[in-house]
Image: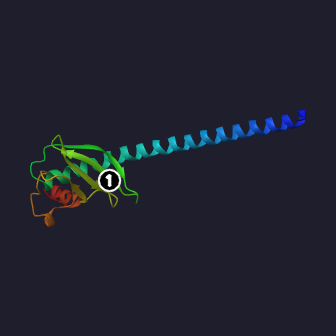
Amino acid sequence: MEMKTKIILTSIGVLLLLSITGGVLFVKHEIDKRETVEKDRNSQLIAEEGPRIEKYLKYNYKDIHSVTITGVDNSPTGIPHILGYVNDNKKLSFNAGIYDEHFETALNPSGDSFPHTKLPDHETLTVSEIEKLEKAQ
């Protein structure tokens, strides 16, 4: 092989290697940036909606003494679900969907021993209804 051909092939190899490395670093940076934005958004969501979920649980369910939020799970459809448990018992977990601007009533408790509602299921109050009652008092 000629010297000129070796130089051209080496140059192409180096350029190819640099392009691949740059592409990998760019993609990694974009993934890290997206994860940071998602963590910030989830933290803000928990800060805003955690108190609403706690209010809903304590008003509508019997014997709820404490509410612990454990995280956010974003469904494939883009609906965020706040996860947690009550009364310091991880077996008494719940999944609260945020379908509109704020949490209102979309709660899925798990386990047979989850505290029962104070009223029949169809009569539980939304967070907005609870807040109206609190303002009227």
User: What secondary structure is marked by label 1?
Assistant: strand
Quarter the N terminus occupies: top right
Considering only vertical position in the picture, is 77 above or below 89? below
Q: Name the residue rendered at 37%, 46% in the picture.
A: 42
| Front in this rendered view, residue 134 or 46 | 46
* On-image quarter of the C terminus: bottom left
Q: Is residue 74 above or below residue 100?
A: above
Neighbourhood count class around disc 1 (C-alpha, 10 Å): few under 14, some 14–19, many 20 upward: many
Is 37 left, or right, of 23 in this rendering? left
The residue at the far bottom in this view is: 122
Q: Quick one: 95 or 37, which is closer to the camera?
A: 95
Identified at 14% across, 63% down, the residue is 121
Pinpoint residue 44: horizontal percent, then vertical percent: 36, 46
Name the amino acid type tagged 1: His
The x and y percentages for residue 122 are 15, 67
Q: Residue 126: x, y in percent? A: 21, 61
The reply, left or right, for residue 69 in relation to residue 80 is left
Q: Does residue 27 appear to the left or right of 59 in the view shown?
A: right
**Number of residue marks:** 1
Locate residue 43: give its quadrant.
top left
The residue at the far top in this view is 3
| Residue holding disc 1 | 81
- Determine the image quadrant of residue 24: top right
Residue lying furthest front: 1
